[in-house]
Image (cartoon, helix red, strand yellow):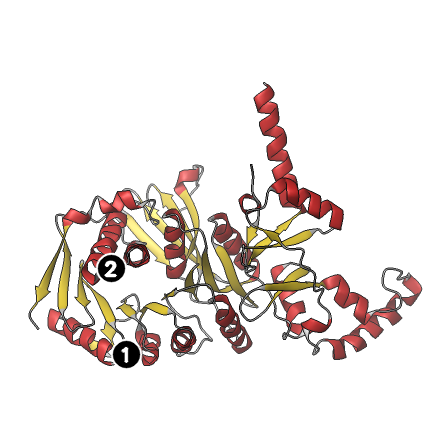
Amino acid sequence: MITTVTLNPAIDREYFVDKNEVMKNQFIYNDEDLKIYPGGKGLISAINFKSLGYQDVQNIGFVGGKQGMFFEKMVQKQDIISNYIYTESEIRNNVKIIGREPATYTQYNDYTYRVEKEEVKELIVRFKRSISESKCILISGSVPEGVDFDIYQRLIKIAKDKGKHVFLQASGEALKLALKSNPDIVTPYFKHHKTILDMEMNDKEDYIRAGKEIQKQGAKRVMIPFHCDRLLFDKNGDVYQLSPKGYCIVNWLGSSDAYNTGYLDYAFQTEDFDFLEANLRGGAAALWIAENKEIYLQNREDYNSYLDRLEINKLEV
Amino acid sequence: MSNVRDYMIRTMNSVTPDDSIRKAIILMYRSEQSVLPVVNHQNLFVGTIYSNNILKNIIPESFGFLDSSRLFYEVNEAVENLKYVKDEKVEKYMARNRDAVKEDSDMKKLADIMLNNKESVLFVTNDNGFLRGFIERSNLLHYLLDETESKTAAEE
């Protein structure tokens, strides 16, 4: 059983129009111009794992209201085991309007979702019993309003006390506190913060300093996005830079989730784990998503064919 | 051969024997499920809690025979009883049946179990007894419809 955690899910709605104009009614008649799908970083990875052939994949988190039920139906349709705490408040809807000519992208991000204390308490109880079959837990994404920033710290502690491996993708205060519970793998992201552990990220040295600090504060291995590259911090102190060659990015959405999936899929499949090889798989999966108009991975063959378009160089630090 | 896993609903929505009846009721109405699986602290299936069974315990005398002249009295009595029952544990009201089906069971076998036990919902576990979800009559009908249509297509 693979467990992924999504605390702040959303229903993502994409509308494709010829030209996005203010004060103009738009009419959508074609199915292809309207996409509705369940969003949330942990969930996207869960769907990827299903595509790669894993039988039991569960997604733990919160959903709320009638839209939460709709979200859950979409998740179950992907054959993911839903494991949600039902909240009083309705979950989020993110709306994206994509204009073709000229190419425009307008996004309305909904941050109205709120979780009550009793519901958080319930999540902790459910999480404790639901991870008994999993060896590895992937915790990824933002934290909704009403949930304290120490939530990841608490979840990781529970998982580590039960001997599980934890892969964490987080940002801001939630990341900072989570390090106290010693997650095995950490990858920060920058959606809402341009800092890591309150440090401004400008040049490569800042990123290297941040990676080292994350390790110092409790993580065994760290991967930090650095423009289109990744800086890799192995547990022995070595630092590497993973770079794609000759790429053409058409889509960011889902690429970091594909990276997490590719990395962990390699870890699950091998008995002789190699940190650099795991990152090559992750990088290839992310590159495949970035160069294709897809959010989810479809199979290993697709992205493994991108492996020779990546290089890793050791950095002298 | 079609398996239960082809038609089931995958969800870990559940309560434990230690949970309160209040928690079970909230979960029932929020998830729109009137029957919930009960699992232990390892997520192993141990029984079922039915909304009917909770109702029977708060309107003990006349459940199923409510006539309109007594309705107001009965509802008030139920509200009073629920004040005490809501804090009691699920284990007191759950059915400790083991009628869960395995996810790789044949759908034909499921039809037999569902119709013989008059259960509208059966919980699904893996081979080790861990909860995987549930399957209900509408899923059984879905399977039967698929069978009918594939048989008709083969005859044509």
Please determine whether, in this image, residue A166 is positioned above or below residue B128.
below
Residue A152 visible: yes
User: Where residue A84 sits: x, y (%)?
Assistant: 52, 63
User: Where residue B24 sits: x, y (%)?
Assistant: 65, 69
Residue at which label 2 appears: A272
Residue at which label 1 appears: A218
Using the image as rendered, state which of residue A44 and residue A88 is in the foreground.
A44
Residue at image position (42%, 44%) is A34
Tell me the crowding category of disc 2: few under 14, some 14 to 19, or many 20 or more residues within 10 angstroms, Cα based: few
Using the image as rendered, state which of residue A118 and residue A191 is in the foreground.
A118
| Label 2: which secondary element | loop
Can you name the residue that lies furthest to the right here?
B69
Say what amino acid the circle numbered 1 marks: Gly
| Label 1: which secondary element | loop
**Quadrant of image for the N terminus of chain B:** top right
The label nearer to you, 2 versus 1, is: 2
Say what amino acid the circle numbered 2 marks: Asp
